[in-house]
């Protein structure tokens, strides 16, 4: 009897390991739905597979399956954090792996909670559980992931669909509306492939898929925003300065000279945009250079939006900012900072240890949530720096006045990885949600001009210095 019991337990354990392995592989495969791969059907199939794997499991085992799914998604989806922290940030390997593992564990918790709650209150499969629980829970937990503990909205399901029919939901309900549509599609797919389902339920599932895909196609024909003036010639400068060389003192003058030369090639544009922290100096140390740039812009009828680090001696604070050089310009300071990248959320004794270990620990300060409107080339600008364009809700206030969106970034931190393509995908979603043109200036790529439907109007090759030129139109009005 005991031997038989051990055999049953071994069989159950083996079956559980198979489920965990399948869930991990499914989560990893979901990355194929995002850029640069763009296989968006995978972003419907992977959640459907997860829903099938957890069907009928006790809540705790379902949560383990959910955790494996999340671990697969973020282990493969954020591998570039190693390059950022250790490769360019100088963080020791052990601390890099600890931070990276901690992020994956935290992110996996969300999918674990989803599966636990679904099977805790809706253990029996069926309409109530599948249709009423799984998609709302997915959206709710993805939304929480986007802001809780500073938030990490990267790899949200909706970002996989800028080139799919589901993209039409973005102007209506934002990226989470697309997530919801994809989750309902996943539920419908589980109904279609499950055994013992009545023809009526299969037909209903097919109708749901048709509605989810056809409604946004029809809605995309509606012009929610309208041009408010003639096209504006713009230029985005891509300096292509290697991240490991950028802040070395010996390279400072060469970097400044490179941006000066590229700017001279951009004359004729009404607005010239430089990437995040484009010059390896504090803005307070180059006042004469910035004044010379302002005067040159006046001579060529050009305004600037320049990514620079600024220092406020009154408060002893450093800011990651965009300096808008125009008649109605000024500073915009980044509000959503990167934990362990721009600031260290650790107690003082850890800072003391980091100082002793000669590890980087200086913090960038966050800008105020309420900042003045800045204008250039006659347009109110909606500005974001680096990955804070992942927080679409933070732009809601400025969108009532902004007619042009700008994102400056330095994705050189991530090397030649999927991160830069995923980030461009996020920017495309912001343009699509807002129904506005977006200018994106990156240090070594991906520099692009995006249209109000999230389309790529012009893109510079990666890892090459150059100037992107495009004509963009100011847009007014608000999407739903």
Image: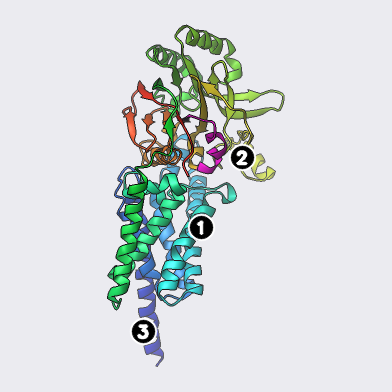
Kindly report the distance in space between the C-alpha atoms of the residues bearing marks 1 and 2.
34 Å
Q: What's the residue at 40%, 81% (across, down)?
A: 9
Classify mark 1: helix, strand or loop. helix
Which numbered circle lies on residue 354? Answer: 2
Which numbered circle lies on residue 7? Answer: 3
Instruction: Give the quadrant of residue 281.
Output: top right
Q: Nearer the viewer, residue 165 or 108?
A: 165
Range of magenta residues: 391-405
User: In the image, residue 245 lies at what x, y percent?
Assistant: 44, 25
Badge count:
3
In this view, the residue farthest toward the bottom is 1
Q: What's the residue at 58%, 36% (across, down)?
A: 335
Question: On screen, 106 above or below 288?
Answer: below
User: In the image, residue 45 lies at what x, y percent?
Assistant: 32, 59
Which numbered circle lies on residue 141? Answer: 1
Left or right of 188? Residue 438 is right
Question: On screen, 214 above or below 50?
Answer: above
User: In the image, residue 310 lies at what x, y percent?
Assistant: 60, 24
In this view, the residue farthest toward the top is 299
Precedes in sequence: disc 1 or disc 3: 3
Classify mark 3: helix, strand or loop. helix
User: Magenta segment: does it hold 309?
Assistant: no
User: Magenta segment: does it hold 404?
Assistant: yes
User: In the image, residue 444 lies at what x, y percent?
Assistant: 39, 28
Classify mark 2: helix, strand or loop. helix
Instruction: Give the quadrant of residue 254.
Output: top left
Kindly report the distance in space between the C-alpha atoms of the residues bearing marks 1 and 3.
38 Å
Q: Which numbered disc, 1 or 2, marks the residue closer to the eye?
A: 1
Instruction: Give the quadrant of residue 237.
Output: top left
């Amino acid at each position: 009897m005991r031997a038989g019991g051990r055999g049953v337990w071994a069989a159950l354990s083996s079956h559980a390991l198979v489920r965990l392995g399948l869930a991990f592989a499914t989560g990893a495969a979901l990355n194929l739905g995002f850029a640069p791969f763009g296989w968006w059907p995978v972003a419907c199939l992977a959640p459907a597979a997860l829903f099938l794997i957890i069907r009928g499991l006790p809540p705790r085992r379902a949560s383990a399956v959910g955790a494996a799914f999340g671990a697969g998604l973020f282990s493969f989806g954020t591998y570039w954090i190693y390059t950022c922290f250790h490769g360019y940030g100088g963080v020791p390997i052990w601390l890099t792996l600890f931070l990276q593992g901690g992020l994956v564990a935290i992110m996996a918790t969300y999918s674990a909670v989803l599966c636990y709650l679904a099977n805790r209150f809706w253990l029996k499969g069926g309409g109530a559980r599948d249709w009423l629980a799984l998609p709302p829970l997915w959206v709710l937990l993805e939304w929480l992931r986007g802001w809780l503990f500073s938030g990490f909205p990267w790899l949200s399901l909706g970002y996989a669909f800028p080139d799919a029919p589901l993209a039409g939901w973005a102007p209506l309900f934002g990226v989470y509306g697309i997530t919801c549509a994809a989750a309902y599609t996943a539920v419908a797919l589980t109904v279609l492939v499950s055994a013992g389902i009545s023809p009526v339920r299969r037909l209903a599932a097919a109708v749901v898929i048709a509605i989810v895909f056809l409604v946004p196609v029809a809605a995309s024909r509606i012009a929610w925003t309208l041009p408010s003036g003639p096209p504006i010639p713009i230029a985005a400068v891509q300096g292509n300065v290697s991240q490991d060389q950028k802040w070395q003192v010996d390279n400072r003058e060469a970097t400044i000279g490179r941006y000066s030369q590229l700017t001279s090639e951009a004359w004729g544009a009404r607005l010239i945009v430089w990437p995040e922290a484009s010059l390896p100096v504090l803005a307070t140390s180059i006042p004469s250079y910035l004044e010379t740039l302002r005067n040159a812009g006046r001579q060529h009828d050009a305004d600037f939006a320049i990514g620079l680090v600024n220092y406020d001696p009154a408060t002893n604070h450093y800011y990651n900012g965009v300096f808008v050089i125009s008649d109605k310009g000024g500073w915009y300071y980044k509000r959503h900072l990167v934990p362990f990248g721009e600031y260290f959320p650790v107690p003082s004794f850890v800072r003391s240890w980091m100082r002793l270990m000669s590890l980087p620990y200086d913090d960038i300060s966050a800008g105020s949530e309420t900042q003045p409107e800045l204008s250039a080339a006659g347009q109110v600008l909606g500005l974001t720096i680096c990955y804070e364009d992942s927080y679409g809700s933070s732009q809601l206030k400025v969108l009532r006045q902004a007619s042009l969106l700008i994102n400056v970034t330095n994705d050189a931190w991530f090397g030649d990885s999927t991160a830069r393509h995923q980030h461009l995908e996020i920017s495309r979603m912001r343009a699509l949600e807002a129904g506005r043109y977006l200018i994106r200036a990156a240090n070594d790529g991906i520099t692009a001009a995006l249209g109000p439907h999230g389309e790529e109007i012009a893109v510079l090759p990666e890892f090459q210095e150059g100037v992107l030129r495009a004509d963009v139109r100011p847009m007014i009005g608000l999407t739903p």
